Amino acid sequence: MGRVDGKIAFVTGGANGMGRCHALLLAREGATLVVTDMDEKGGHAVVDEINAEGGQARFIKLDVACPSDWKSAVEQTIATFGRVDILINNAGILVLSTVQDTLDEDFDRVLDINVKGVFYGTKYMLPAMQAAGGGSIVNISSIYGLIGAPASAAYQASKGAVRLLTKSTAVDYAPFKIRVNSVHPGIIRTNMTKDMLVDEAITQQIIGTTLLGRPAEPMEVSYAVLFLASDEASYMTGSEVVVDGGYTTM
Ligand SMILES: NC(=O)c1ccc[n+]([C@@H]2O[C@H](COP(=O)([O-])OP(=O)(O)OC[C@H]3O[C@@H](n4cnc5c(N)ncnc54)[C@H](O)[C@@H]3O)[C@@H](O)[C@H]2O)c1
């Protein structure tokens, strides 16, 4: 018996990194997956991996910053699977620069993908969840949506916004039995961080106050996402789940 048996789950940025692991784990626990990304090759590879493991998945190309992509992806999902129970708003990008060094177009790009991507996803998926009688939305923020860090102006603005967009949505859609929670990963080994976690000395510098003394593997975040997505978290909405090895504890 899987922890999300029979549910239809939709993951953005599912071709790589944490999104890929969220999709794989949800599928292993019984969900049917809609894997979306701009990276078609990576997305198809994840779908093939899920299907090879005996799961059920399909890929839809989706730029989270594009409302017409969202409308089409939701339509295709409903046409294929009939409903959506779980939405994982995971896609995101990182630009590292101070306020003064951040180009206007970079600030816009980060907010378009990291914040408007979550806004559009939520907006266009809500009718399907309302029709299904409820659902679970998991928004991926960051520890940098909770505390400050050097040279991350646009990224921090975006992840802070995701934190409170989550709570706003939780308030408005609780009457529809739609739960909305945010996940705040610490330093995780993915493409996003691979150029930073290059050797042990620099890795130690970047993980900073992480009590467990190491970066995490993506799957260590996926278990928190799975929990929030599942009915096990039936009394959780508007909450922040921090998965940071203790980074923000002290
Ligand atoms: N890696 C970390 O340490 C870390 C820490 C905290 C939060 N996060 C957040 O976790 C999420 C996943 O990050 P990751 O580390 O797995 O990154 P990643 O770069 O490994 O994967 C991101 C995925 O998002 C996709 N993507 C990018 N722009 C997109 C768009 N406009 N539309 C659709 N897909 C798009 C990429 O193609 C890629 O497949 C992001 O929201 C990120 O900000 C990452």
Image (cartoon, grey):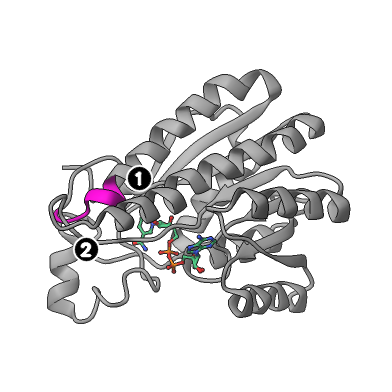
Q: Is residue 247 above or below residue 239?
A: below
Question: In front: 126, or 103?
Answer: 103
- Position of 107 compared to 27: left or right? left
Residue 53 quadrant: bottom right
**Residue 131: where, in percent of width, then height?**
81, 31
Task: For the N terminus, give its image quadrant.
Answer: bottom right
Neighbours of disc 2 within 10 Å: few (<14), some (14-19), many (20+): some
Instruction: Say what amino acid the circle numbered 2 marks.
Output: Gly
Q: Residue at x 63, y 61 (%)?
A: 62
At which x and y percent is residue 167? 46, 28
- Residue drawn at (59%, 77%), measured in percent from left and top? 42
**Residues packed near mark 1 inside 10 Å, few (<14), some (14 to 19) or many (20 plus):** many
For residue 13, say whether it is visible.
yes
Mark on residue 52?
A: none
Q: Is mark 2 within 8 Å of ligand 1?
A: no
Q: Which callout, 2 or 1, points at the residue further toward the start of the chain?
A: 1
Label 2 sits on a secondary structure element that is loop
Q: What quarter of the picture does the C terminus occupy? A: top left
Give residue 217's position: percent from left, percent from top.
Answer: 41, 68
Relative to 87, does residue 195 appear above or below in the rendering? below
When asked about the image quadrant of residue 60, the answer is bottom right
Q: Is residue 120 left or right of residue 18?
A: right
Res. 213 mark = 2
Residue 74, relative to residue 217: is it above or below?
A: above
Disc 1 secondary structure class: helix
Whether the magenta-drawn stretch holds residue 152 is answered as yes
Per the rendered image, the range of residues in magenta is: 150-156
96 part of magenta stretch? no
Q: Which residue is mark 1?
A: 158
